[in-house]
Image: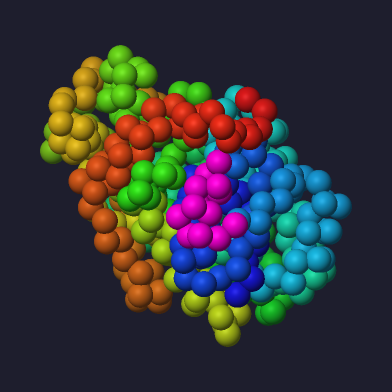
Amino acid sequence: MRILVTGGAGYIGSHTTLSLLEAGHEVVVVDNLANSSSESLVRVGHLTGKNVDLRIVDLLDSAAVDELLGAGAFDAVMHFAGLKAVGESVQKPLMYYHNNVVGTINLLRSMDKHDVRTLVFSSSATVYGDNDRVPLTEGCELNASNPYGRTKEHIEDILTDLGSADSRWSIALLRYFNPAGAHESGLIGEDPLGTPNNLLPFVAQVAAGRHEYVKVFGNDYPTTDGTGVRDYVHVVDLALGHLAALSYLEGVQGTFSWNLGTGSGSSVLEVLDAFSAAVGKEVPYEFSPRRSGDSAVSYADPSQAMADLGWSAKRSLARMCEDHWRWQRSNPMGYSSDPASQHRGPQ
């Protein structure tokens, strides 16, 4: 198949692009490089022996998106592109709604115009909001608690309505939990701009000496060690989940949602212990008060993905930490560790 991957230079997008190429698909990546680096795709090319076709286009540029879809003869689209920092979304909600929702509408209009109606959408467990029910199933109420999560929820609503209105569409909504890890080669991984928002990349940067210690928010939750519990899933497992969803959509129509997670949770201290084991020395941390809105425990029920897609997460927390540390150790400053290559969008 010929696949358009939006946001394909980013963390999950680049790993999925790699998996698509390894599976024999033809891939075109569209990315504005605002929060990613083209170096990731150079390295994907090195790993696969194939040149990655990158088009530097912003989805807000509807004319450029339409031109790309019109000339591409695509069979399907995998849609990762979007702004993704929760804290920034709280500070700049209009920017997030405009970028994520309007960009998606531009993409959908061009897809429809050019008869491309198979879509795998990168959603998120943030659509469930602060939900005390665990494990989280696809039938749980959607109630995102921040603008970033609400953009994902709104896009899911748009896609659900589209699939109901036009039976020609085949749409997968993939709600994944906490992506972690990196490709086993250490060549591609997570390279966040500024201070990482997520736990594992921050732990990795502390281990690399870029920060003094990990701040653990709350040690008085009703969990085994008092720290928050989350479902961490290896980024390579996530990539393979996208391929499984793409395969499922062949020959079926409608809108389908699946959780991609391990089905179990790990506490912050368990993550720190596992990463310390991978590094070979203790990663320092200090406790801080709870953050408002953080739930004690959140993890997926991924049984529907197993039943429908034959997909389950294979890689352990220890493996995530080992792979993430290999990436961090080899690329202490992310993709900018390689001074020869970079193109990064506006900071």
**Residue at 23% in and 20% down:** 285
Please state the extent of the stretch shown in magenta in the rendering: 39-51
Query: Where, quadrant-wise, is the C terminus in this rendering?
Result: top right
**Residue at 70% in and 33% down:** 94
Image coordinates of residue 75 in percent, x first then y, are: 66, 73
326 over 141 or under it: above or below: above
**Secondary structure mostly taken by the magenta-highlighted segment of the chain:** helix
Looking at the image, which is closer to me, 172 or 243?
A: 243
**Residue extending furthest toward the right:** 63
Query: Where, quadrant-wise, is the N terminus in this rendering?
Result: bottom right
* Residue 48 falls within the magenta-colored stretch: yes
Q: Is residue 262 left or right of residue 149?
A: left
Displayed quadrant of residue 121:
bottom right
**Residue at 51% in and 60% down:** 49
Image coordinates of residue 118 in percent, x first then y, are: 63, 71
Image coordinates of residue 273 in percent, x first then y, are: 16, 34
Displayed quadrant of residue 341:
top right
27 over 93 or under it: above or below: below
Q: Is residue 240 left or right of residue 215?
A: right
